[in-house]
Each structure stands twice: as structure tokens, then as C-alpha cells.
Image (cartoon, grey):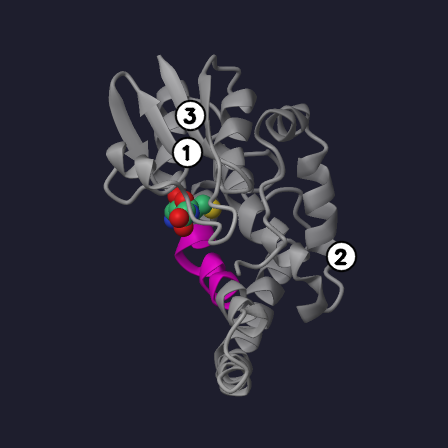
Amino acid sequence: MIRVHHLETSRSTRLIWTLEELELTYELVEYTRHPKTRRAPLSAKSLHPLGRFPMLEIDGQILAESGAILTYLVEREGKLGPIDGSAVDYTYWMHYAEGSAMLPLLVKLLTSGVRGARLPFFIKPTAKTIANTIDENFTDGELQAHFGWIEQALEGKTYFAGEQFSAADIQMSYPIQASFARADVFPARPNTSAWLERVQSRTAFAIALQKGGEPIMTATPQ
Ligand SMILES: N[C@@H](CCC(=O)N[C@@H](CS)C(=O)NCC(=O)O)C(=O)O
């Protein structure tokens, strides 16, 4: 039995997408975010000590961490993995998505949250200066570097691991979707836009959206 523990507007839409691509039957258990903090419910910690989503419940065991979950499913089903000669790219992008690309996006979410936070009026200018300084000295440059690199890597390529759609595309979708939600930071990215359109036109993605909702939260936490 496969059960997906799914948090609204989160990475777990990516797991629903994968299961739809693999044509597997599963049960969806939905969780909502706290309306103010946007954090996951504490009850999720009864499933796994970190209470982070997605979580895959399979044969009585809980597996967390998207990259681990997708790798497990790809190996179990023998589908969506690398084809001949693409293992290097496939492995790189499977790990790069969460290992590197997500960090500057998360920092940007936090600094934007600080700028928009309801704070005592005398603290607000200082908080804003700190958030701006972090973005100027780190976040904005890192965002340009990472998403510029992704744009360059997609030049002349159909998918991240070559000519065949793979789990690496699903894994990379979340940071890329999140980067487009903050599009003001970037110049035009034609290769990335074309890739996103290509993968989002898949039937399994449409079903995942229908079942799990939009993966990206646009409003910043208050
Ligand atoms: N690297 C982890 C990240 C897991 C994670 O942070 N998930 C977010 C959802 S996008 C979450 O559960 N957030 C709940 C919270 O922060 O309370 C993965 O890829 O699974």
C-alpha cells in the first residue's frame, strides 16, 4: 500500500506527479499549513521527527526527503531513471535541486518575510536594512548564478538528462517553478521557460495539480 502525506502548496505535489507518471495507485492524505506561520501541522512529527513534506508511506514504513523518495520509486519500478549515457546528468540534477538550488530561494523567502513582517515601527527600518544587506551580499547573486547555470545547462537539451523525460525533471521542477514565482530577480530565461512549458504540459502533471494543488506558495509568511 502506498500513501502520500501531502502538504498544501509544497514540494509534495512533485511526489504526486511522480506516482502519476509511474501509474501507481496510492492514497492521498492532505495537510494544511498554519494560516499565519504557513508551517506544517505539528501532528506531522508523529510520522517523522522532522515533520517535513513530502512523506511516502510504503509497506508500513515512512520515507522522507523528496530526492530519496523519487530515487526509491525509480529503482523500485524501473521507470523514469536515466537511459544509456545519461546517468551522470541524471544523478547531478537529482541531487542539485535540493542540495544547491533551493538554498538561495529559501533565503529570499525569509528576507522577503522579514521585509513584510508586522514589527514595531522602530525596529522595522533596521530589520529591512538587514534583510536587504543579506540579499545584496548573498541571495541575489546566488540566485543569478544558480538559475543562470540552469539556463546554460538546458541550452540545446530537451530534458535535464538528455532526450528522455526522467525523475530529474520532476525533481528540478520545484526550484524552477519557485524561481519563476520570483521572476523580477532574473533576466529572460528562454531555455528554462521552454523546458518548464514542456514538462508542465504532461498529463501526469495536470493530474498532480488537480489532486494536490499548486506547488508554490506566492504569499510570504507573516
Ligand atoms: N529537502 C526536503 C525539504 C522538505 C521541506 O522542507 N518541505 C517543506 C514543504 S515544501 C515543509 O514540509 N515545510 C513545512 C514546515 O516548514 O513547517 C525535501 O526535499 O523533501
The disc placed on residue 190 is 2
Q: Secondary structure at mark 2?
A: helix
Q: Is residue 153 above or below residue 58?
A: below
- Mark 3 or mark 2: whose residue is earlier in sequence: 3
Q: For the magenta stretch, what is the residue range?
A: 94-107
Magenta: predominant secondary structure element? Answer: helix
Residue, x 31% and y 20% (percent of image)? 58
Q: Quadrant of residue 21?
A: top right
Look at the picture and state if 80 lies above or below 138: above
Q: Position of residue 6 (x, y in %)?
A: 46, 32
Q: Quadrant of the N terminus?
A: top left
Q: Which residue is mark 1?
A: 70
Q: Is residue 218 left or right of residue 124?
A: right
Between 157 and 144, the residue placed more toward the observer is: 144
Mark 1 or mark 2, whichever is nearer to me: 1
> Which residue occupies the foreground of this view, 113 or 13?
113
Is residue 94 visible to us here?
no
- Mark linked to residue 4: 3
Amino acid at dot 2: Pro
Residue located 64% across and 59% down the image: 151
- N-terminal of the pair, mark 1 or mark 2, is 1
- x%, y% of residue 89? 48, 48
What distance separates the C-alpha of mark 3 from that of mark 2?
34 Å
Residue type, label 3: Val
Left or right relative to 95: residue 18: right
Image height of 203 relative to 46, above or below: above
Residue at image location 25% in from the left, 18% down from the top: 60
